[in-house]
Amino acid sequence: MNIHQLLQQKFKAALIAIGAPEDAPTPVSRSTRVEFGEYQFNGAMALAKVLRQKPREIAENIVAAIELDDVVEKLEIAGPGFINIHLKNQWLATALDTVAQSARLGIEPESAQTVVVDYSSPNLAKEMHVGHLRTTIIGDVVVNTLEFLGHKVIRQNHMGDWGTQFGMLLAHLSDKLKASEVAATALSDLEDFYREAKVRFDNEQGFADRAREYVVKLQGGDTHCLELWQLFIDVSINHSEEVYKKLKVNLQRSDIHGESAYNDDLANVLRELQAKHIAVESQGAQVVFIDELADKEGNPAVYIVQKSGGGYLYSTTDLAAIRYRSTVLKADRTLIFTDARQALHFKQTEIVARKAGFIQADESYQHCPFGMMLGKDGKPFKTRTGGTVKLADLLDEAIERAALLIAQRDADLTVQEREEIAAKIGIGAVKYADLSRNRTTDYMFDWDTMLSFEGNTAPYLQYAYTRVQSIFRKAGLDATNFNAPISIEAPQEKALAVKLLQYVDALNQVSVEATPHVLCNYIYELASLFMSFYEACPILKDGVAEQTKLSRLMLAAITARTLKSGLELLGIETMEKMG
Ligand code: ARG
């Protein structure tokens, strides 16, 4: 039951009944203050001209014509012609009961689309660093939400597993193997390995030439080179998979469709662009001039698809990827999560791809940019010595810090419980601190804030969930299997019920805008409303009437289910107790 849609439908019908045009908008929004009811309609003012009536008069006519008797307690005309909508407690109780009886919390699958989601996509030459945290977890939440809403999601881990730097890496690896080192050992620290190779590339006579030969051989399909490459890639993918496991991110090998997968198609892409006169020669390179993105002087943007030496680029690969996703994967929509610095690249890629007909006219292609993770000093997040922070190390530190916190709380937990909870809190905190910010802005990484049990943090939400569990434990009941008639009386009960019914709105918004923070805000508000409800409306205290107690338990149970569902979509684990 979607309140918003229902109200819109009813207002639409009422508008038509009073003679408004068929396409008159029905702006229904949430009220900002309880006195104004739960929702507001503010479409009367815009109709004054068309209907040649005063807005207040129009509002009165709408109120007289609308059929909402079962749903609203009163409709109040305010100001110049706003209509304040006060929902009926009885109706809310029934609607909430319907939600409670459904395994999916009343969320009906949307008309399903095939959505390709390109996320995580680390570069395999190095280990995953903090820059890949955001793409990995933001993408994961959007994927989870789209699937929950019934869409067919195809994950594409567009790993950077190809390109010139592999020449130097393979040459170095080949020497190590010749010196009887085992690949897994040689590559146990990819950063060190990369550094060593780079030093040789820059300083050692003849090494750079060998590296270049390796690139040519690799791209030409030389078996020995491909074997070396495969060895390297496998070890590096293992590193990424360890991170995914720690992060509880659901990316499988079968989701990997890296840059190398497009290698054989790059020449075709170029040929097609040339045949359509989209790509032309310029200073020995093949380029597309993009007039749509011309600078102030009118010079078109230059998008290179083949370097003068014949090499292909990141852009060529993305053109091949667009076409593959459209024709083979049959995408209706593609979402790509990378940092904001790549925004221009994707804008250009889309323009070129549309010109070339690589993508259907009605197919959407959405680059979803995100800002940077900053240290407390406001500068890009680095290690104390100024190096890039390995994601794996950051996550280990999160778990260690959470373990310390739990130890301080002097909890009554076994060693094993402690370890499990520390992992859930530590990883949850890092993820939530990131997810709860609007992705387009930079944010400051701060251990103390994210691990706090107060405020908009993962520990606070995990705690709210355990709070409900402990109520049920005390009552000797099972929250997951609880059922009782709901009756809504206190304002805190009403506020909680309305919020619970708005879960679907939050999910729909995440699905459209690819913004996990909307779900975070929702969960946080829900948890806060629950806390206020719990303070104002005693449940297990003496003197609470049996029916009231059962109804309040039911509200608590639905809250717990919604919290758990939302946190699951956010990839944040819950626990039954924290200590
Ligand atoms: N490997 C790239 C990076 O680490 C991200 C790839 C994003 N996807 C794409 N289709 N280009 O920055």
Image: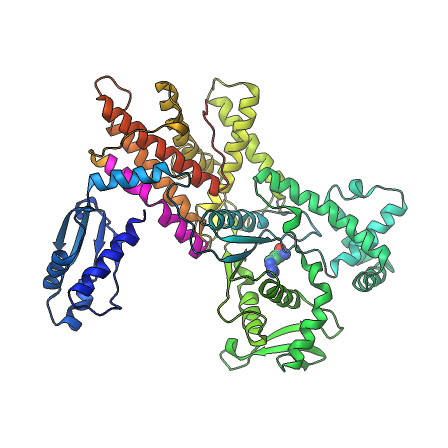
**Relative to the observer, which residue lies in front, 340 or 256?**
256
236 versus 480 height, above or below:
below
Say left or right for 325 vs 37.
right
Start-end of magenta stretch: 493-514
Question: Where in the image, quadrant-wise, is ligand 1 located?
Answer: bottom right
Q: Nearer the viewer, residue 201 or 517?
A: 517
In which quarter of the view is residue 553 placed?
Answer: top left
Quadrant of the snapshot with the C terminus: top left
Q: Please report the residue visible at 24 percent of the width from the left and 29 percent of the height from the top.
A: 536
The image shows residue 122, relative to residue 250, as above or below, that is below
* Left/right of residue 304 with respect to residue 41 in the rendered view: right
User: Can residue 306 be seen in the rendering of this structure?
Assistant: no
Q: Residue 209: within the magenta? A: no
Q: Position of residue 337 (x, y in %)?
A: 54, 56
Question: Is residue 253 among what the camera can see?
Answer: yes
Q: Horizontal and vertical percent for residue 85? A: 19, 50
- Where residue 99 appears, as percent x and y from the top left, is 34, 40
Q: Is residue 143 left or right of residue 454?
A: right
Residue 140, image x, y percentages? 53, 47
Q: Name the magenta segment's main secondary structure.
A: helix
Query: Residue visible at 23% across and 25% down?
Result: 547
Please indicate whether residue 512 sits to the left or right of residue 232 in the image.
left
Residue at left 13%, top 56%? 63
Query: Can residue 505 be found in the magenta stretch?
Result: yes
